[in-house]
Amino acid sequence: MAPKPIIGLNLDFRAAKKDAPAFSFITAGYFDAITKAGGVPLLVPPMETDEDVQLVLDRVDGFCMIGGADLDPRRDGFMMHPAMRLLDPRREDFDRRLIRMISDRRIPLIAIGAGMQLLNLNEGGNLFFHLPEDMPKALPHKDPLDSAHRHSLEVVPGTIMERVYGEGEIRVNSCHHMAIDQVAPGFIVSARCPDGVVEAIESCRDDWFALGTQFHPESDSATALDLRIFEEFICGVTGDTTALKIAA
């Protein structure tokens, strides 16, 4: 029997406060989903040196970039929006270095929420910073009173998302106000909300298996079908890509 693939997961970070020390954390749904899909999760906190990060990447077979708060647009030359609630700088520093190294090494990747947005930025795409202003006719993508808010999803034929969900109406969770604007070169949109907001992307490069979802297939509000996304990812990690080929 082949060994299970080791999948790295970055951790969130909260700086010290007067009444609490600094700590890293992760929602259990991420590592539970990786485990159920056949991988072995390896939790990776924010690290200080590139050398240490490279040592970790030497030992993993794939990586999952988790979601979280908002990316700081000032790092990319844009202005803050009042609606933004930013990642802790220590986590964002690390995540930006990490995604560059993962991309350079073409490590199989699944990126979720803010992780997908960072993937798109790193590869040359850009973002909408506040959907109610950037796409005023868009459906509600965040309900402060309903953490299980959902909307429908339209998948693109011939993609991993179609293989996961098949035909028919699909509904996924939604809790974001930022989203992808221009998709990075080397990637395609594989699912959208009916209002046009990008909800999933996939690499169309022959040398990199990578996919991202704006929604959260690991969350408590996800369905059993959503776990198939992680199973497809593990297939990509292990090299079982005969059924995963995406037409460029």
Image: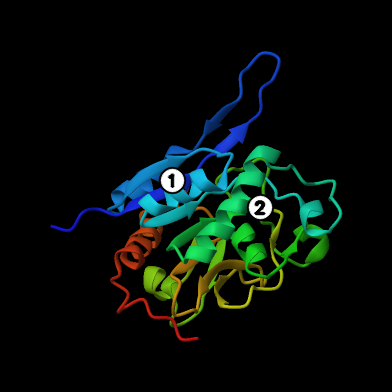
Percent across and percent down for residue 166 are 39, 74
Q: Indicate which label's residue lies in the foreground, 1 or 2.
A: 1
- Under tag 2, what secondary structure? loop
Does residue 27 show up? yes
Amino acid at circle 1: Tyr
Percent across and percent down for residue 122 are 64, 63
Q: Is residue 22 above or below residue 36?
A: above
The residue lying toward the viewer, choosing from 71 and 190, is: 71
Amino acid at circle 2: His
Q: Is residue 168 above or below residue 74?
A: below
Horizontal side, residue 121 vs residue 53: left or right: right
Disc ID at residue 134: none
The residue lying toward the viewer, choosing from 7 and 171, is: 7
**Residue assigned mark 1:** 30
Seen as rendered, the residue at the extreme bottom is 247
Q: Identify the residue shown where x is 66% and y is 22%.
A: 16
**Quadrant where the N terminus is found in the figure:** bottom left
The residue lying toward the viewer, choosing from 108 and 211, is: 108
Q: Identify the residue shown where x is 67% and y is 47%.
A: 143
Q: Is residue 34 above or below residue 131?
A: above
Q: Identify the residue shown where x is 80% and y is 46%.
A: 83
Horizontal side, residue 232 vs residue 1: left or right: right
**Residue assigned mark 2:** 176
Q: Is residue 43 above or below residue 21?
A: below
Q: Identify the residue shown where x is 49% and y is 43%.
A: 52
